[in-house]
Image (spheres, helix red, strand yellow):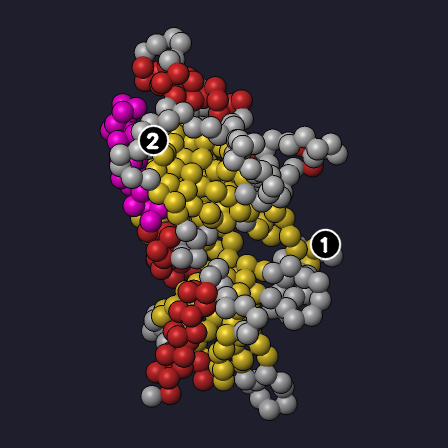
């Protein structure tokens, strides 16, 4: 969910701790815009717009150096570790961040317990960057830690994911020299929620234009959707119609295995369980990448709708659902897709859409 401001809120200096590089970039930006050598304290003020809790995956070496992804073993349908040339294959998993938007900048604030080994300490002092202490009180007044701050005038592209399940933000940051290429930062926000995607998109759109104009840039932000790219990556037959798509996780009943991020696609004739990765997320080498953040899909399992005998919610968690898939011949046993959605609403929508597709397939 989001916590948003009213239009009458005053400008305030953000109490967010930044890396030294980001602080210097902020100061230089203010100097450039105001034409002064020493910025006034009031020039650091920003108007708060909103915050969103998101799972974020950084793409490209520059973005990954700040929002370091979690590297986990790639798993097959049964939870087995995938190997290649005798070595375990790794995949990049997203991390939890608080995305804070002001009228002039976007902050990625740490909201998990992942701390790079180089910054881990044995003493009780809080390291940077790390999440807000769980027992912190209002009187303690701890500052949130942002792993990066991007001025909105650096936002050059927004890609709306298929069926609003994700939002891809592309920033181009000056390298401090006209002769050097800009630094490209790309982030995939795995919202798994249409309303949340639209909320963030609308807020960004309403403020990025003003921010670019105030910075003296007349270039517009490219806003597109990746429907064609997604459907091409899915490789489905031209006569298949996608009825439902959702980013979720696959679970296993036995064994100490972390959940695997998947994508579930329901068409008018099939259900697909997919492995979804993004160009530059660190799952594969960065060589020969056409564009950071572009989606790649691999089928983990699939079945005709006629083989789906049941779809039900789990009793212990409203976000969890199970699909029972009948075997292709009587000599085999049915198998189950144990899935967990981002929220209960997503699980309800998935159950409803699968059941509707099953009924239509019987007609």
Q: Residue at position x 31%, y 42% from top? A: 203
Tag of residue 47: 2
Residue at x-position 35% and y-position 9%? 36
Q: Residue at x 63, y 68 (%)?
A: 252
User: Which residue occupies 40% across, 9% down?
Assistant: 38
- Of 303 and 37, nearer the camera is 37
The one nearer the camera, 258 or 344, is 344
On screen, residue 221 above or below 274: above
Nearest to N terminus: mark 2 or mark 1: 2
Q: Position of residue 145 (x, y in %)?
A: 53, 33
Q: CA distance from mark 2 to mark 1?
A: 50 Å
Drawn side of residue 54 relative to residue 152, left or right? right
State left or right for residue 84 relative to residue 22: right
Q: Magenta segment range?
A: 199-223
Q: Which mark is residue 87?
A: 1
| Magenta: main secondary structure | helix
């Amino acid at each position: 969910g989001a916590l948003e401001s009213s239009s009458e809120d005053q400008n305030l200096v953000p109490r967010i701790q930044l890396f030294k590089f980001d602080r210097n970039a902020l100061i230089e930006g203010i100097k450039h815009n105001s034409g002064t050598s020493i910025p006034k304290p009031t020039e650091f003020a920003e108007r708060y717009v909103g915050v969103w809790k998101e799972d974020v995956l950084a793409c490209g070496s520059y973005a990954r150096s700040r929002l370091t992804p979690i590297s986990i073993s790639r798993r097959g349908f049964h939870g087995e570790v995938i190997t290649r040339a005798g070595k375990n294959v790794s995949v990049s998993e997203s991390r939890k961040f608080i995305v804070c938007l002001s009228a002039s900048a976007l902050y990625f604030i740490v909201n998990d317990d992942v701390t790079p080994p180089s910054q881990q300490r044995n003493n009780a002092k809080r390291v940077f960057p790390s999440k807000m202490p769980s027992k912190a009180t209002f009187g303690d007044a701890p500052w949130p830690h942002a792993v990066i701050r991007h001025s909105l005038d650096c936002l050059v592209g927004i890609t709306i994911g298929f069926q609003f399940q994700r939002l891809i933000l592309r920033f181009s940051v000056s390298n401090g020299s006209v002769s050097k290429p800009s630094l490209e930062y790309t982030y995939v926000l795995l919202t798994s929620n249409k309303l949340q995607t639209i909320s963030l998109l609308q807020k960004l759109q309403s403020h990025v234009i003003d921010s670019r104009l105030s910075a003296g840039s007349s270039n517009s932000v490219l806003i597109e959707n990746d429907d064609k790219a997604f459907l091409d990556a899915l490789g489905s037959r031209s006569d298949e119609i996608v009825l439902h798509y959702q980013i979720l996780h696959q679970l296993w009943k036995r064994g100490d295995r972390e959940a695997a991020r998947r994508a579930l696609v329901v068409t008018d004739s099939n259900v697909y369980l997919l492995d979804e990765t993004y160009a530059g997320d660190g799952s594969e080498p960065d060589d020969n990448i056409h564009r950071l953040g572009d989606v790649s899909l691999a089928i983990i399992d699939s079945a005709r709708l006629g083989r789906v005998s049941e779809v039900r919610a789990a009793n212990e968690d409203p976000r969890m659902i199970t699909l029972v898939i009948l075997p292709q011949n009587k000599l085999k046993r049915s198998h189950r897709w144990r899935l967990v959605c981002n929220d209960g609403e997503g699980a309800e929508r998935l159950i409803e859409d699968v059941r509707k597709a099953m009924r239509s397939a019987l007609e």
